[in-house]
Amino acid sequence: MASKMNVAVVEQFGQPLVLQEWDIPSPGAGQILVKTEACGVCHTDLHAAHGDWPVKPTLPFIPGHEAIGLVAAVGSSVKNIKEGDRVGVPWLYSACGHCEYCLTAWETVCAEAQFGGYTKNGGFAQYLLADPDYVAHIPDLLKPVEAAPLICAGITTYKGIKETAAKPGQWIAISGVGGLGHLGIQYAKAMGLLVCAIDIDDGKLAHAKRLGADLVINAKAGDPAVALKKETGGGAHGVLITAPSLIAFKQGIGMTRKRGTCVLVGLPPGEFPVPLFDVVASCITIRGSFVGTRHDMAEALAFAADGKVKADIELQPLSSINQIFSRLEHGDVPSRVVLDFARS
Amino acid sequence: MRAAVFSSALTGTGRFLEIKDVPRPQLQAGHVLLRIVACGVCRTDLHIVEGDLPQVRPELIPGHQIVGEVVEGATTELPLGTRVGVSWMGGVDGDCWYCHHGMENLCDKPTFTGYTVNGGYAEFASVRPDFTFPLPPGLDDVHVAPLLCAGIIGFRSLRVAGVEQGERVGLFGFGSSASLAIPILQSWKCDVYVATRGEVHRNRAASLGATWVGKEDEKPPVALDRAVTFAPSGKVVVSALSSLRKGGVVAINAIHLDQMPPFDYDKLLWGERQIRSVANMTRQDARDFLKVAHDLNIRPQVTVFPLEDANNALLAVKEETEAGSAVIVP
């Protein structure tokens, strides 16, 4: 095995990533080494590189939390994974396994959780270390570049849909037909829900229709909440806001049926005002949802292995990472960019 | 009017019902009078005429899956000629603990159509307008009738069983109600496992796309998340229970069971498996189901019997000679 690997590093917040050669790490006890085949590029990577959030990563660090690869080496005391297994190294890199949240299958909010490409070096690298207890197990039917967006964008939307508590046959509104939303539409249809997609781009709405949306609404044409309430006879039972825009949050609450649940999964920096009267008088639940548990991950991947969910992807080499970031900043990324490590 | 009437005078005659002329019902205050165009036959009707359920009226016109048109007592909401459906819940008091808690199906003073009041094996019926349901326009009268109890209570059974999307669901005993549950479960992306006696029912289940079909004593090849039993037999409940994963639920869709046989708690119920019963229905169940039935284009298979042949309709349900639902037309 080579001793060096190509990596893309954040050395200073807000500065371009630096392409470097690092030593390939060796797995310690209870760790595995993964040889990256593909890694998705998520808006969160941009926030990480900019140091946008209150808890910042320690510099220098390697972003990337949608890494898929083959296990290249296992450390001592690793029992459940062997060399050659295909795994994903997700945002939830590890958790403590014994706090009240871990014990109730809410490891996503464990206070000791580590985050891939944030508090731990991530997948913008030819190799990375991972915790074998928290990696995703990639079904054989999925190609690495197809699986990559599912272990963050996919699981986030899938879990978000579950958290709306909308039942089959009920309406879910999915705001934003981007990297998350286009997967959300497919998951929601596969789960038997009626889907209304909302966006401000007719091209994306046409795509939403192709993906199975039962109803599409262009939010530019007026308040989407009014149109949606009319079409669904009172609003959507569940609403999933994926659009990274504060106005979408407010509109999302307006779209929620009485006693319905509006789930937020996007993380644009900032705050948004809540129309208290509507929320109180209509008994609406506003709920945050953050990635998903290991079991959610297995379910989210199973839908894709069954051919029911497929991410739109654009393949790029690791060396293009700064151009990709610049396009992400300008909203110029129509589908998920996946770094393909088969390309150099 | 002509009606099929049950009374204890028929005991020992080999007939369930006497078809005869009876006075046309008077329109009661606050009711609407329906001219009946079809009435589905339900196993509960059989329980009533066979004495499995206590007799509450000396003479009774059974039938609680009524399709009818408003002919008297019309209101703005229900103009003359409106086609509506009437189900088993003919009314509730609206004032008891259960009604106040969204559980009107358990009301302390309920009215049951075709049991505590006269039902639909007749030409006319007087019913509470707030317990009538608008019907999907795409379905004709005889095909809509079986939706009104078999369909609605089957749907409620899935709710009581707590079925979630994508789960493995067993249907034990397969008649009208179970056959209507299959397309709903499919729309919820569930895998359906059917265990039932009678080849005609097994074939029907297979033709509706069940993942697995077996005989009543066969065990599905996987552990089930949920099961619903449709047969009036405690033995079937125990087979359903023995097919569940830990934490699984069996819902009993039956107003009457012969008896619950003793079963091995340690093996069958321990592990937080649950047995729940399904009682009656709420109006919201009815509305939700009728909407789903319309959205999914659910069309039951039916066998039509003229009112004069009501005894044969009941016999067909008893002997399970028909794959679909029996419907009586006056």
Image (cartoon, coloured by chain):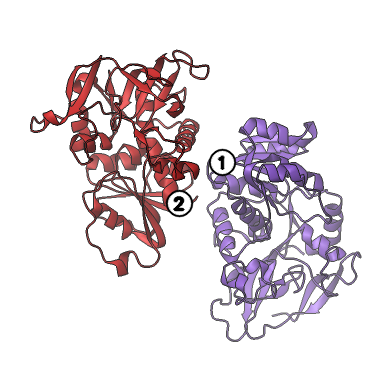
Q: Amino acid at mark 1?
A: Gln
Residue B133: give x, y in percent of width and height: 45, 27
Q: Give the residue at mark 2.
A: B162
Q: Closest to the observer: B107 or B49?
A: B107
Query: How many residues crowd around disc 2 within 10 Å: few (fewer than 14), some, or many (20 or more)?
Result: some
Q: Closest to the observer: A29 or B254?
A: B254
* Up-down relation of residue B243 to residue B101 (above or below): below
Asked if residue A175 shows in the view, the reply is no
Q: Residue furthest left?
A: B12
Q: CA distance from mark 2 to mark 1?
A: 16 Å
Q: Give the residue at mark 1.
A: A170
The shade of chain A is purple
Asked whether, in this view, residue B162 is left or right of residue B44, the answer is right
The secondary element bearing badge 1 is classed as loop
Q: Residue at x 44, y 24 (%)?
A: B129
The shade of chain B is red
Asked whether, in this view, residue A68 is left or right of residue B145, the answer is right
Asked if residue A112 shows in the view, the reply is yes
Residue A271: give x, y in percent of width and height: 82, 54
* Res B141 → quadrant: top left
